[in-house]
Image (tube, helix red, strand yellow):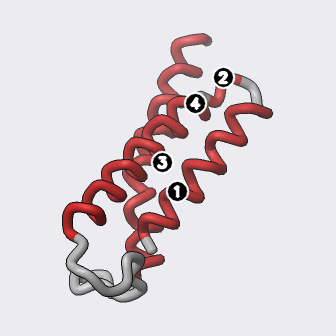
Amino acid sequence: MWLVTTGVSAMGATVLNLFLPKRYKFGFLALMLWGATIMILVDHLLGYKGGPFLEKITEGMIESGTLLGIVMLFPILGIWLGSVLITNLKRR
């Protein structure tokens, strides 16, 4: 499910990039999210051994696949917010 969570976030960032001002750098956010989506897809494809392709339960510290996807978004959002803040501070 973390593949779906990241993919939906990437699509949302792409739509926001089309309709909101460029100063918010949604293109940069979309680029990072699409990169993460592609990396997760490749990981799923290389590690596929049969059975369900999208797993709802993981074997790691975070057992929910959806929650794992949301937690994986935090570093990406943090980098994006830092980039937007630094850019806006330089403009002043």
Describe residue 49's horizontal placement relative to residue 57 as left or right.
Answer: left
Mark 4, residue position: 27
Confirm or deny contact between disc 1 and disc 2 (CB under 8 A): no
Q: Earlier in the sequence, mark 1 or mark 2?
A: 1
Q: Is residue 9 left or right of residue 79?
A: right
Q: Which of marks 3 and 2 precedes in the sequence?
A: 2
- Mark 3 is surrounded, within 10 Å at the Cα level, by few (under 14), some (14 to 19) or many (20 or more) other residues, namely some
Q: Residue furthest right?
A: 19
Direction front: furthest residue: 50
Closest to the camera, between mark 3 and mark 4, is 4
Q: Amino acid at mark 4?
A: Gly
Q: Earlier in the sequence, mark 1 or mark 3?
A: 1
Callout 1 amino acid:
Gly
Disc 1 target residue: 7
Q: List the residue tagged with mark 3.
A: 77
Q: CA distance from mark 3 to mark 4?
A: 13 Å
Give the camera-side residue of 45 and 26. 45
Label of residue 23 in the image = 2
Mark 4 surroundings within 10 Å by alpha-carbon count, few (fewer than 14), some (14 through 19), many (20 or more):
some
